[in-house]
Amino acid sequence: MLQVSGLQVSYGAIAALRGISFTIPEGAIVTLIGGNGAGKTTTLRTISGLLRAKTGKVEFLGEDITALPAHQIVARGLSHVPEGRMVFSNLTVEENLSMGAYLLSDKALIAKNRDYVFSIFPRMKERLKQTAGTLSGGEQQMLAIGRALMGNPKFLMLDEPSLGIAPRLISTIFEKIVEINKNHGITILLVEQNANLALEISQQAYVLETGSIVMSGESKKLRADPQLKATYLGG
Amino acid sequence: MSEFLQQLLNGLSLGAIYALIALGYTMVYGVLRFINFAHSEVFMVGAFIGYYLGKLVPEGTLWGGLLVLAGAMIGCAILGILVERIVYRPLRGGPTINVLITAIGVSLLLQYTGQIVFGAAPRTFPPIFPAANFHLGTLTISSNQLFVIGVAVALMIGLQLIVFKTKIGTAMRAVSLNPKAAQLVGVNNNVVISFTFGLGSALAAAGGILYALNYPSIDPLMGVMPGLKAFVAAILGGIGNIPGAALGGLILGTVETFIGGSQFSTYKDAIAFAILIVILLCKPAGLLGKFTAEKV
Ligand SMILES: Nc1ncnc2c1ncn2[C@@H]1O[C@H](COP(=O)(O)OP(=O)(O)OP(=O)(O)O)[C@@H](O)[C@H]1O
Ligand SMILES: [Mg+2]
C-alpha cells in the first residue's frame, strides 16, 4: 500500500533521515520504533507532505506522492495523526470532527463517519460542545484519531499516541487502534517509543536509529531479539 | 446631555469605520502572524474606486450608493488577494520581519502610485447616498451617520456569520490555530489565506467609502492616519481576535471624538496611543485577547 524508498531528509545541514526504505502491506499494522530524535516524526511528516525529501520516493497505492502538497495527499486517503495531537484547541469537539471531514461533501457519508467515531470513542459524543483545548490529554488523542477517521482514510499514520497519557488510557487507545484496523480495514503505521506495546499489536516492525533503519522483521520475532530487548524493551 | 449624545453618535460612527479596518489587520494576523501595513492603502484605494464609480451612477440614490460600495469592495478584495499572492506569498516561511518590512514597502508603493494615478491634490467625494438630517430634540443625526453605522453593523454581523457558521470560516479559524493540522485534514492553506485577504480588504474598502462619506476630501495619503488608528484598535482589542477588533475600533473612535471636542483637542491623535499603552500595561494581550498555552 505504501512504499518508501531511499528517503533522505535534512533540516538545514542536519541530516534527519539518511536514506530509509520500507513497505507497508495493505491491511497490516506496522510499527516504526526508535528512541528520541531517531527520525520517526520526520518520516511521517515527509510521507504526509509537511516536509520535503531531499531525495527518495514515497508511493501510495502505486502513485508517486513525493511532491504532492499535504492537502492533496490526505485527499488520496492517507491520514496523519500528528505528534502532540494538534487538535484545534479553540474549536469545539464537534467543529474539530467536522474539520476532519473537510474534503467530504456527501452528508450521508459524513454522518456515517461520525457515528463510527462515536462508536469507537463514545466519550467524544458526550463532549461535542466542549472546547478541544479543555479536554484531557487522552481525550485529545481520541479526538485527534477521530478527526482523522472523519475523512474516511484508507491508511492511518499515528505518531506516538501514548505520549503523555495516563497508562490506563494508553491500553484503551491501543485496543481502539486494533479495532480500527480489524473492523474497518484501515492500514496503520504506528510510531512509538513504547516499543513493548507497539510490537504487541503490530505484525511487522522497523527500528529506526539516527536516521537509518537498523532492524526490521516480524514483530513477534523482534520481541524476542536479545539486542532489541536490551535497548528498547527495558531488558 | 444632548451634546454628550451627539458626540457619542459621532464617535460611534467614526469607531465603526476604525473597526471595519481593524478587522482586516486582525484577520490577516490570525492566519499569517504578521501585520499587513499595506492595509491602510487598501482603504484609500477603496475610497478612490468609490470616487470613480460614483461618477457612473446618479448621485444621492440608495441603489447607486450600494452599487458603488459593492464595486469598491470587490475591487479591493482583488487588490488584497493580488498583493498577498505576488508579494507576501514568496516570502512565507522566512523570518516575519522580512514580510513586515515588505508590507511597509507595499504601503509606500501604493501611496506613491496613488499620487501618480489619482494625483496628489485632494478630491471631493461625491454624495453617493441620499442625504438628509434628522432632528431628535436638539440631536442632529445625518443620514450618512446612519449609513455608516448601519453598513458597518451589517458587515460585522455578516463577517461573524462567515467566520463561525461556514466551512471556509471554520477553516480560517483552524488555519489560525494550527496551520499544519489544517493541512493534515485537507485544507489548502493558500486558498484560506487568499480568502482572508479578500475578506479583510473588502471590509477596508467599505471603511474607505464610509469614511469618505463623512470626510469627503480624499487623497492618496488619506489611509495613513485611520490605518494607524485601526491598527491600534486591533492591538487594543487583542490582535487576532475578531470581536476584539470591533470593540477596539468603537472605543478608539468614541474616545477620540470626545477628546476632539474638549480643550485637549490638539492631543486627540496622541491620546489613541496613550490609551493603547495604558491598556497593554494592564492587559498585555489586549482587551479580549488571551495568550493561549498549548496543552501538551
Ligand atoms: N524543525 C527542526 N529543525 C531542526 N532539526 C530538527 C527539526 N525537527 C527535528 N529535528 C532533528 O531531526 C532529528 C529527528 O527528529 P524527529 O522529530 O524526527 O525524531 P523522533 O524520532 O520523532 O523523536 P521523538 O521520539 O523524540 O519524537 C532530531 O535530531 C531532531 O533534533
Ligand atoms: Mg517524534
Image: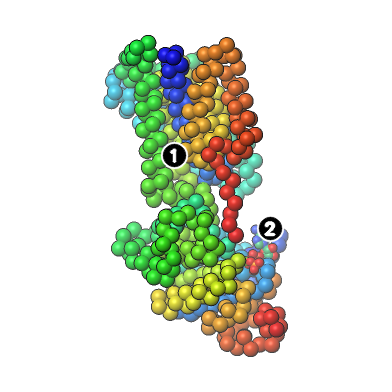
Q: CA distance from mark 2 to mark 1?
A: 34 Å
Which one is nearer the viewer's eye here, B25 or B286? B286
* Mark 2 residue's CB less than 8 Å from ligand 1: yes
Q: Tell me the mark number nearer the camera, choosing from 2 and 1.
A: 1
User: Is B219 on the left or on the right of A43, as rendered?
Assistant: left
Q: Which residue is mark 1?
A: B198
- Image position, residue B237 (x, y; %): 53, 35
Q: Which residue is mark 2?
A: A12
Local SS, label 2: loop
- Image position, residue B257 (x, y; %): 50, 19
| Badge 2: residue crowd in 10 Å (few <14, some 14–19, many ≥20) | few
- Marks 2 and 1: CB-CB under 8 Å? no
What residue is rendered at 64% in x and 45% in y? Answer: B95
What mark, if any, has residue B162 been given in the picture?
Answer: none
What residue is rendered at 39% in x and 26% in y? Answer: B149
**Amino acid type, residue under disc 1 in the picture:** Gly
What residue is rendered at 50% in x and 29% in y? Answer: B249
How many numbered circles does the render carry? 2
- Placement of the N terminus of chain B among the 4 image quadrants: top left
- Image position, residue B152 (x, y; %): 40, 30
**Amino acid type, residue under disc 2 in the picture:** Gly
| Badge 1: residue crowd in 10 Å (few <14, some 14–19, many ≥20) | many
Q: Mark 1 falls within which chain?
A: B
